[in-house]
Image (cartoon, rainbow, N blue to C red):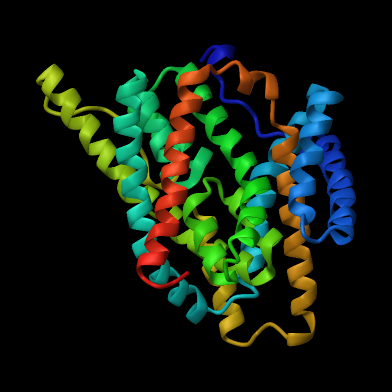
Amino acid sequence: MSATTLPLATPSLRQRTPGLLLTVAIALAALGLGRLAPLIGGPVFGIVLGILVRNLVSPGGHYTAGIQFAGKQVLQWSIIALGFGLSLDQVAKTGLESLSVTLVTMTVAFLTAWLLGRVLGVPDKLKILIGVGTAICGGSAIAAVTPIIKPDDHDTAFAISTIFLFNLVAVLLFPLLGHLMHLSDLGFGLWAGTAINDTSSVVAAGYSFSKEAGDYATIVKLTRATLIIPVCLALAFAVAWREKRKTSASGVASDFSLSKIFPWFILWFLVASGVRTMGLIPTAIQPAIHLAAEFLIIVALTAIGLSANLRRMASTGARPILLGLGVWVAVSVSSLLVQLAIGQL
């Protein structure tokens, strides 16, 4: 095996330390600012401070490993920690309550991406990436379907940049709009959980509105994230069928793997919730666990802000951004309309 084909080694703790220290330091500042301005909240301050540092100071490459670790792994830990504060009964009830809204918004996202994408002349694979990213779970969904549909690298970059842009807008705008519309905690949680893309942004917007809204939005979002499994399976079968027709072969080799796309941290979230349901978490330490979860969320969002390259986002061009905007608005409005129709607003 040549040196160019060797897999990249996992960064060591020493390599991750500079980025982790930088991220935690900014997150501590964001936590303090969030206490001073609770209407904005620590998560929003974290992502904004991260963006400012990334684009004004531009930390060197030796910070990258720790920032990436915080943006992915620490976020998953924060979700698991939130599970210790939620009973399984509450998780199941919320998941079932939100399923109808989730299915409607997913359908709207895919239809809008297809129709508006055709009008704008956006390539098919880019339409799929933006549609899946908006409908289900942002960058995670894009990463999940990429090995299935095999888009060009620039299409993937366009889709991720577009989705990330509207994640930022949602984190800053949704809590304000929720208060202006006088949404209840559950109403806002359902709206955020079904209409915002990435889990991190859902958590940030939800807890910026209220703790109850954040808890509800998190469960709704995790329920929605599991739907990436049937979507990826459907795409895999569609791609295999199309390739089989093209090549008239008996089968198509694929690197598609269910274990690669399944969001395993959701299972650990359910385990944590089960521990809470069985009464194994003393009441006295539950506030400390929630505080730890909140801080981990701020750390993760700070890392995501530190990864945001505004120049790269601006270079993606107008058509993907217009498509992302159209799909995002359609999903946001349809979520509110469905809630209004079923009497949940």
The structure residue drawn at horizontal position 69% and vertical position 24%, both measured from the top left corner, is 310
Q: Is residue 208 left or right of residue 250?
A: right
Q: Is residue 214 above or below residue 125?
A: below
- Please tell me in which quadrant of the rendered image residue 217 appears: bottom right
Q: Is residue 1 above or below residue 54?
A: above
Work out whether residue 81 or residue 28 is closer to the camera in this orientation and state it: 28
Q: Is residue 324 above or below residue 189?
A: above
The structure residue drawn at horizontal position 70% and vertical position 59%, both measured from the top left corner, is 208
The structure residue drawn at horizontal position 59% and vertical position 35%, both measured from the top left corner, is 164
The structure residue drawn at horizontal position 69% and vertical position 50%, both measured from the top left corner, is 74
Q: Is residue 65 left or right of residue 122?
A: right
Q: Is residue 320 left or right of residue 294?
A: left
- Please tell me in which quadrant of the rendered image residue 213 appears: bottom right
Could you say where residue 108 lies in the image, as x and y percent from the top left?
A: 33, 46
Could you say where residue 288 lies in the image, as x and y percent from the top left?
A: 80, 73
Q: Is residue 124 above or below residue 191?
A: above
Could you say where residue 263 lies in the image, as x and y percent from the top left?
A: 48, 52
Could you say where residue 67 lies in the image, as x and y percent from the top left?
A: 75, 37
Work out whether residue 92 or residue 282 is closer to the camera in this orientation and state it: 92
Work out whether residue 113 or residue 10 is closer to the camera in this orientation and state it: 113
Specify whether residue 262 is in view: no
Number of numbered callouts drawn: 0
Specify whether residue 285 is in view: yes
